[in-house]
Amino acid sequence: MKRLFLLTATLIVLTFFHSRLYAQPVCKLESLPHLPDVAITSVTQETQYAPHCKVAGVIGTEIHFELLLPEKWNGKFVFGGGGGFVGSVVNLASGLYGAVQSGYATVGTDTGHRAHSLDASWALNNMERIVNFGHMAVHRTTVTAKALIKGYYQQDIARNYFIGCSRGGGQALMEAQRYPDDFDGIVAGAPAYNWTIGLGAGTMQIMQTMYPDPNNLQEAVIGPREQQLIESAYLEKCDALDGIEDGILNDPRRCQFDVATLLCKGKKTDSCLTRAQLAAVKTVYEGPKDKHGKLFYGFPFGGETDAGGWSMWVAGGLQEGLGSDFPAPITPAAHYSFGNGIMKYLIYHDPDWNYSTYKFDTFREDAKLAGNTLNATSPDLDAFRKQGGKLLMYTGWSDVAITALGTIGYYEDVIAHDKTATNDVRLFMMPGVGHCFGGKGPSWVNYLIEIDRWAETGKVPDQITAYFVDENMHPTGSRLLCAYPQMAKYDGKGDPRDVSSFSCVEED
């Protein structure tokens, strides 16, 4: 009887401690640790996506964040990057990659200011906000989120990931370079990593030729007819180079088409370009220059007629900005807002700065101060790799927001710095894909699954399947993506919208 009593008592004690150890956390403020310089503004139980606890708060004076803590936690954390000039809490991991449904604790931030994503006026003469936007807000949010997650679940985090595209892609590279211990795996899509030269100079020189008079923004020098003319001309020459005539260039660099052949020989018609139009087109394809030569990469062929291509970014005609909780600026093209915002508020701090008469002869020196904070251009990833970090990069060949050639350039700089970086850094080029998503090509890949698989198994990804999707995000076909510099080659038979019809080969 005594032995039975002792056994029963032991079971009761073990059950008590087991329930304490594995009890579901309660979604309330008292379940969260108190952190210095962090104010929790709300804690609410949510059901969207999957049952989770939503924690909103402010770090310091202005860094807002939202942390989502799923009931069925998988033990992992993923930070979702923002876009544009950010300005509101954005979380790509939750919105696009289903992080909460998959059990990830996930966080997003407004990077320390509140405004429309096309508006940079918040940065005027405010270095604290610029530093927060440049890198500090993401790092502080990361540190805060990790502490809250550990305190809420009373467990250590098994894996820490970051995933972002565009501005989020630039945030990803900034984390790998400046804060190498923050994450085990990082996904950087279409990274906006050079804000001064790449975006500032690049977008403004395009605007100087597309909209030479900033007081007349009703119509770009290049309109829809010219966009169609250019795309049709190079596709006629190059579409079949990859063995499939589908309006997609496997690698636009292989297309040896000279847009100068479209110059009008006489009177302007719909089948030729005027000198002003040719100059504008060349500015897009050749990239920004100053008196010393080329400043940054131009754009490859692609995206001229896509809904999210030239009409949105470089030559769309007067349109409202992207949706947001804040007033949308009126802009003729997204590059107009980004370029003017960078020049007026991040570099020169002059709201009256005007691109129409600006010369770029002193720009390299003028942009250095801002570049030291904003640009994630260092190829040195040694510290990140030393602690086991993995970096997966991707970009669309038809991206007209962030040039694919710039993404390749950064990747090649990393490999030139250390050839063994190919063990920990991979780049996947996406033919026919626009900015982050969309376009004529197969644009859907769940990169959260890909980075998790790499981190968990240690197997370096050489190939990835990308999917064509319809407006309801249902797959309508697939193709192969290959780790750069390899490219997918059509086998010459089989369905060209089936991944099994392709293989990875070295470029010719």
Image (cartoon, grey):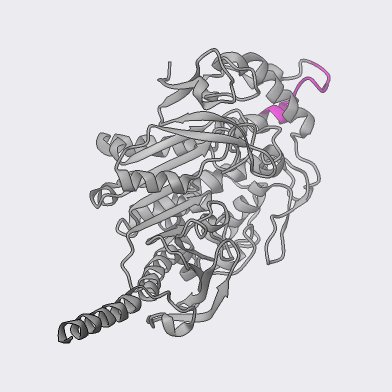
Quadrant in the rendering for residue 122: bottom right
Vertical order, 391 against 110 (above or below): above
Nearer to me, 365 or 184 = 184
Residue located at (72% from left, 20% from top): 263
Q: Quadrant of the N terminus?
A: bottom left
Nearer to me, 431 or 12 = 12
Q: Quadrant of the C terminus?
A: top left
Vertical order, 132 against 304 (above or below): below
Nearer to me, 448 or 407 = 448
Q: Residue 164, how many percent across, how many down? A: 49, 52
Tell me if residue 260 can be seen.
no
- In the rendered picture of this protein, how many numbered marks are placed on residues? 0
Tell me if residue 165 can be seen.
yes
Q: Give the residue furthest to the left.
A: 3
Name the dominant secondary structure of the magenta segment: loop
Q: Is residue 267 magenta?
A: yes
Quadrant in the rendering for residue 231: top right
Q: Is residue 372 magenta?
A: no
Vertical order, 29 against 126 (above or below): below
Q: Residue 250, how many percent across, how many down? A: 54, 24
Vertical order, 220 against 320 (above or below): above
Q: Residue 338, how many percent across, how many down? A: 61, 52
Specify the segment rendered in magenta: 266-278
Residue located at (50% from left, 48% from top): 192
Q: Give the residue furthest to the front.
A: 1
Q: Residue 423, how many percent across, how many down? A: 28, 37
